[in-house]
Structure formats: structure tokens, C-alpha cells
Image (tube, helix red, strand yellow):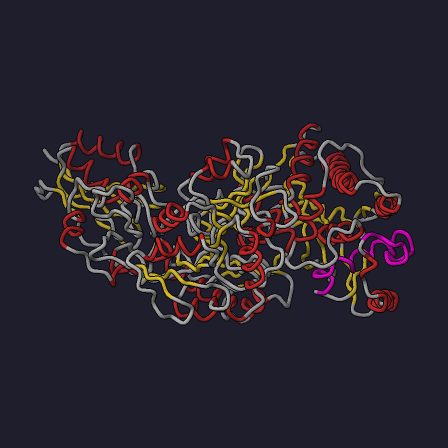
Amino acid sequence: MNERRQIHVEGIVQGVGFRPFVYAIATENGLGGFVLNDSAGVVIELEGDRQALDRFLIELREQAPPHALIEKVVCDAIPARGEESFTIAPSRDEDERGAIIPPDRAVCDECLSELFDRSNRRHRYPFINCTNCGPRFTIMRKVPYDREHTSMVAFPMCLECEREYHDSTSRRFHAQANACWRCGPEVRLVRPDGSELNEVDPISAAARLLRSGAIVALKGLGGYHLACNALDEDTVANLRRRKKREAKPFALMAGDIQTIERFCFVEEGEKSLLRAPERPIVLLRQRDGDSIAHDVAPGQKYLGWMLPYTPLHYLLIEDSRLPLVMTSGNLSEEPIAHEDSDALQRLSGIADYFLVNNREIQTRCDDSVMRQFDNREMMLRRSRGYAPRPITLSRRFAQDTLACGAHLKNTFCLGKGYHAFLSHHIGDLETYDTLQSFVAAIEQFKAFFDVQPSLIAHDLHPDYLSTKYAAGLDGVNKIAVQHHHAHIVSCMAEHGLDGPVIGVAFDGLGYGADGTIWGGEFLIVDLTGYTRRAHLRYVSLAGGNSAIREPWRSALSYVKDSLGKNPLALELPGWETMSPSKVALVERLLHLNLNTFRTSSCGRLFDAVASILGLCHEANFEGQAAMALEAAALEGIEDDYPFDIEENEPWQIDLRPAIASLVREVLAGSETAVIAAKFHNTLVSVITKVCLRLRKTEGLNRICLSGGTFQNMYLLQRVVLWLRQRGFQVFVNSKVPPNDGGISLGQAVIANAVVG
């Protein structure tokens, strides 16, 4: 006798071709019934003989589509109905929502083949996609994932697309974004005033303009990019000037890895990252010689490259035959433009032309950035291609949780069940537009994932906009989480560690429990708390945010603290350009302790050394001085500088001997690259020595490294090597950024552990 079973499948099972896959294996096994999307995932009812039903359940898990992620399968026996045929039924939109929205995916090889096939009806159609690729998160309005819940609702399918959509043998069987030249979105080339250029092929025309030196704003998956010829020195300099982005590196796009290898070294693991369906920007070490325009990444050893991920990108690269700058469509530090009217308004002073289309972007989403470290991916910005895919944790959230994240590189995190839904990159919460984007995205995620937070985690800093947002929420339990505790727990959470561990948190700044600014911390950490066991010795800095924007202020403080003289008097390199009156004013503020703050920040230490060496006296973006110092460091140097550890509680690492030695070498004319390397080596020695002492006193052998300083590859590689050689287990962030983009995950996990 036939049996009938009802199966509920949860995970990433919408927008990945899961229903067509279920249809195929059900019909192959001769089963009747139906499959449908609901707000929690996928529902299947099957009827047939027991062997076929059992075989179906095995194939369901073993042969799932490549981008699906099955997390839970619940199977119940229900009464048979005598149903012999199998269908894909209409979706159910229910009150309880638990479906996981898939991230956007790069165009697949099969669609790419059709794109360049002159005989194919979608030849050169810039929105070609199928069940295995294309937009998902950025076009979704609500779950379940159906066309009427996406931006594609504005484009009724033509008869041919409709036929494919209902053809079980087609790759576009139930592909919700299915479209073609007849029925889908269209591209137009317009001037900054919105007037259209009457071009038969707008993409080819845009490619010609790029070759002639134009800057083109183009609408991608998650927002606008600004594109130009990456080999043209004048054009790149012009883009940098118009965008008001004086030094921060631009991202690049090339059509294939062979082109990228002309300019950078690309290891096998890095090739895999570049080719991944998420298509992140990957940081790669530059070659000498044949070079990209200098202003793409002035003073840097690494370039950020990505391969095309939309059909439009492929066509533009193919037609222009150029490597392109492909940077976010915004003015410096603003949110990326994603609405057409906003893009024309905000980018009209930057772009010469706009390549626009009439498919709405529902969620702005910057490109993700990563690099390879220790044969693993290391996330630096988690956004398009990865968000909103959840991070599955080993501990369940006791209640729905919202973690508001940090001030810089903000992300937020929603916790529900075993899932941490880390948002896409929001950015620095320094403008009203970014704050609006932050608030809107939280509401969107709450609706998508049916999360109603009763527990709110936020940073200790009272003036962060994320903290003020949390303070304005009523009727919820709020927990303030120390910044560096959150950094370390973000690393622990993704590795499934409960603690205690030795946590080394090095970064630019974080509000400390004693009211000072921390950033060079050695903590003993578990999920509910921490003990501060050691830190870099406090130094007073003058000027608040000015101390971050002007590394010379850090240099002044460190040199005065170490040698009793200011860098101007010592005639350090580049200091002859400094205003003596301004230096004297800052000296006086330090002397009187006016408008100053005490800090253990490793980021400000990097600033100081970069300025002492004459590499960077004024920073145009966060981390610029530290990046310049890393880029200057010479490989193969083993020497370091002296330092002391004052064993009061907590221990203080006194780097005055190191700074004094370093300054003397600068004044003696020693090579900048050697000094930069010795400074990095000194920090390696500091970390190793302190961790060895902590292992002796605490009996701990596991170390978590987190914080923005550990984006420095010169430092990180040596620290990890030295610690492992001494028998430590070392963990670093991989799935979430070590910088403040990973803070929200740590906040969420800590708050959940605290409430129990």
C-alpha cells in the first residue's frame, strides 16, 4: 500500500532552485504530491511506496542544489489521498516566518555561455539568470521568495519565458527572476541631467566612453558603481578628486584571472576566492613593473580585485577590453547610492555618464572584501554574496536578540534559535543618511526573519549613534557590551569556543570600562565576562577625533612621553612642514590636560610611528597611517626594539624604550623599511611574551586574536607563527571581519550568555 508523508525543510531552500529539484527527484521516483514555499521554508507532501519515499529522503539531502543549505528536515506520516502526479503548488504566506533568504549569486557558467552565444535569444541580455544564479537578497521585498515579492513583479513574463518557467526540464523552471529582451528590465545610457543618449547598444557605448577616459556610474546588484579605465593615470586621479576620496584604495574589476595576474600575485586559494559565486573583492599582493594607475591605491602593496558577477559587468569588460576601477557609487563615507533619482543627484558631480536600468534595488549592498590567510578566507567586509546568510552557532539564543554593532564599519546582528543573522555592511554611523539606512535595514531584517527582539546589546560608548538607537527602544532588556570583549567573543563564536581564552584585542579605539579609550588589550575572556590582564601603557592624546585624523598628534605624544622633546625640535622627517604654533598649542593642551584623552590604543601607536617615520602626518581615512607603515616594512628583518612589562594590575606594556630607540635610528638615517619592520617585530615580541606569562599564570593555551590591527598581514603572520611555535592554539576571525564589522556578532553572543 502507498504511504503519504509531509516534509518540512528549513535552511536556505528558497531562491536556489529547490522546488524544481524536489519536483525532479519526486517524479523520478514515481511519487505523487506537491512542493511549495511557505514563510518558514519548503513544504513537501509525497505519496508512493515506502522504498521510493525512503530513496527520496536520501536524495533530498545528498543531491540538493549547489547553493542550498538544508538545516532541518521534519518528516511526518499523514493519511494517503491516492495522489499520483506531482506539482509545484502556490506559495503560502503565513504569519510565522523562518525562511532564510539567499544571498545574491554571480552569473553562472551556463548563463554566461548563453550571454555570448549569437544564436541564443538572450544573446547580450544584461539581466540573464536562472535558478542557480542572479539577484536574490537585493531584489526581495518579503518572504516567501516568489516573483510577486521581488522587484521583478514589475516585469510580467513573455510567452517564451513563461513557457520556460513551467517547463520541468528547463534550467529556468520556477526561476523567479526569469526575463529576456522582450519582457525584462532594460538598460539606458543617460547624462548627469537625466537626458538619454539614443544608443542602440548602451553598454557598448558606455564601453567606448570608458576607453576615451570617461567616468561612468553603473547600476549593479546592490547599488551604483563608479567605473573608469584603471590604466589611465589622469582619469583615475580625476575620479579620486571628484569623489573626494584622497587616498583610500579603489576596487578593481577584470574579466579573468589571467588579466589580474599581470598586476598581482594570485595563489591557488585566492583564485578560488575570486571565482566563488559570492564574487568578493580579494586583496592581492602587487607585482613590480606593469602597473595599474598609481592613484588606484597610492602607497599600498595590495590591490583589491574582483571578477565580474553580473551579465552587465561581463559585457562592459568584454566591450571595453580594459581592467576597470569599480568603486562604490558614493561620495567619501556616504552610503552607496542604489535608487536612480538619488544616484543622479549625488553622483552627477562625479560621473560623466550613467548606465541605469529599471529594475529596483530593494536593499543597498556593498561588495564584500576578503583576503586569504592561513589557507582560509579572512573576511574584511561581509556584504554582497554573503549577507543575509546566517552564521550557525553552537549555543541557542534564549530569546530574540538585536545587537546594534559599533560606530565604524557598522553591521548589526539579529539572533534567533541557533542563527546569527549578521547584516550587510552599513558603514560608519557618522551621517543621518547612514543612520537611516541602519534603522531601515534592522526593520527589514526583523520582518524577513520574524525576529522580535526582547534583548538588545550595544556598545559601552554613550555617544555612538548605535548606542543612542538602543537607548531609544522601550520595553526591552538592554545590555552594554565592552568593545574588546565583543571583538574576542566574535572570534570565539565562529569557532564554537565558550572560553576561557586569552584574548588579544588590538585596534584603533574602544570605550573602556574605566572611561579611557582602550585598544591594546590582553583579556581573559569567556562568553559572560572578561578580566583585563595587560594593556599597552596609556598615553595622553589631544584633540578628540583630530587625534585620529592627524597622526602627527600621536607622534607628538609618544615622542614627548619617551624623550621629553617634540618631533619638530628633533627635526624628524616631514615635520618641517608642520605649523610651529599648532604644535605648540597641542603641547600646551597636553601639559594642561585640556581636551585630552588617555588611551592604550594600538591603532594610535601605529599612527605615531608612521608619523615619526614621515610616512603619514594626516590621514584621509581610518587606518591609512597603519596601512602605510605595513606597506613600508621590509621582509626578512628579525630584529626588534626593547620594551618593558610593568607587573602591576593590570600589567602595562611600556614601549617608551622602543620609541626612544626607533627615534634615534630615524635621526641616524637608518632605512625606513628596516625601522618599520623592527617596529612590527616588537609588537610580535610583546604579544608572544605577554601570552607566555598569561599561560603560566592562568593555565590557558587557547588564544583568540581580533581587532582591526590584525588585518595587518605582516603582523598577523608573524604573531600566529610565533605563538604556534610555542605550542599555543591560535584562533582568528574568518567568517566575520576582525575589524568593527564583526563586533555585532560578539555583542549578540555575550548578551545571550549574560541573560542565561
Q: Is residue 683 magenta?
A: no
Q: Residue at x 72, y 37 (%)?
A: 634
Location of the N terminus by quadrant is top left
Q: Position of residue 532 (x, y in %)?
A: 72, 49
Q: On screen, 365 above or below 377? A: below
Q: Nearer the viewer, residue 283 or 170?
A: 283
Q: Position of residue 308 (x, y in %)?
A: 41, 46
Q: Position of residue 668 (x, y in %)?
A: 89, 43
Residue 559 visible in the shown view: yes
Q: On screen, 224 above or below 318? A: below
Q: Nearer the viewer, residue 232 or 702?
A: 232
Q: Nearer the viewer, residue 426 or 584?
A: 584
Task: Examine the image and state in which quarter residue 27 appears.
Answer: top left
Instruction: Tell which residue pokes out farthest to the front in this image.
Output: 212
Overall secondary structure of the magenta section: helix
Residue 750 visible in the shown view: no
Q: On screen, 363 above or below 378? A: below
Q: Residue at x 45, y 63 (%)?
A: 352
Highlighted range, magenta: 546-573
Q: Residue at x 25, y 47 (%)?
A: 123
How many numbered discs sit on the rendered protein? Answer: 0
Q: Position of residue 707 (x, y in %)?
A: 64, 48
* Left or right, residue 348 beside residue 79: right
